[in-house]
Image: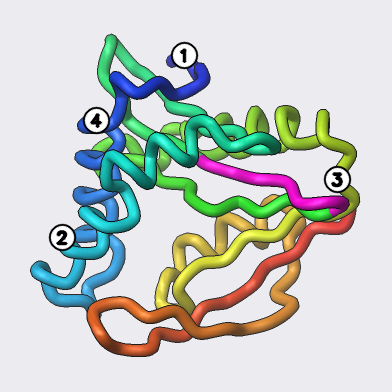
Amino acid sequence: MEIRPATLEDRERIRAVARETWHDTYDELDADTIDATIDEWYGDDALETALSKPGTAFLVAETDGDVVGFTHGVVTEAEGDILRLSVHPDHQGEGIGTALYERLREDLQDFNMERLRAIDLASNEGGQRFYETHGFEQTGEGKVEIGDEQRREVVYTLEL
């Protein structure tokens, strides 16, 4: 497995991993809502912005030339945010998520952050276990609109 910075050429493969992961993880969302959300959040313009914004790290994990996971984080002042962390369902449990997280954390620490946050839908029990295993604590909740509905998010924080 190789972890490397994402490029514009990775856009389709990032979307494919995101789509498969969301369909596998968020069974409370209907398929059309998931597809529309992926098209919006991972569209060409959104990914181009994410790949070029200062204070941002966007990484992909490749196995045998295939993108099997990705992560996207950004630092604002002293706080880092993990915006996305996805591993294709066929490759979960292989340590790819942990490797992506560790590399993202290293890259973001270059920006002198004091804490790292992750935000995920409250329904993602696997995400909750992942973040808690890596020392994060649940510190808050929020709402995000997905498919014209408000969904509950959970905020996890790790003090560095």
Find the magenta span and give its range.
72-78
Q: Is residue 40 left or right of residue 139?
A: left
Q: In this view, does 15 lie to the left or right of 103?
A: left
Work out whether residue 121 or residue 35 is closer to the camera in this orientation and state it: 35
Disc 4 crowd rating (10 Å Cα; few below 14, some 14-19, many 20+) is some
Disc 2 crowd rating (10 Å Cα; few below 14, some 14-19, many 20+) is some
The quarter of the displayed image where residue 7 is located: top left
Dots 3, 4 in contact, CB < 8 A: no
- Residue 35 is tagged as 2
The quarter of the displayed image where residue 89 is located: top left
Cα distance in 3D space between marks 3 and 1: 25 Å
> In the rendered structure, which amino acid carries the disc numbered 2?
Asp
Q: Earlier in the sequence, mark 4 or mark 2?
A: 4
* Location of residue 85 in the rendering, given as x and y in whole percent from the top left corner: 48, 47
Instruction: Identify residue for label 4.
Output: 13
Work out whether residue 118 or residue 93 is closer to the camera in this orientation and state it: 118
Instruction: Give the secondary structure at mark 1.
Output: strand
Q: In this view, does 69 lie above or below 124?
A: above
Q: In this view, does 42 lie above or below 101?
A: below
* Location of residue 47 in the rendering, given as x and y in whole percent from the top left corner: 38, 39
Disc 3 crowd rating (10 Å Cα; few below 14, some 14-19, many 20+) is some
Cα distance in 3D space between marks 1 and 2: 28 Å
Chief SS of the magenta region? strand
Q: Does the magenta stretch include residue 129?
A: no
Cα distance in 3D space between marks 1 and 4: 15 Å
Q: Is residue 107 above or below residue 40?
A: above
Q: In this view, does 140 lie above or below 47?
A: below
Instruction: Give the secondary structure at mark 2.
Output: helix
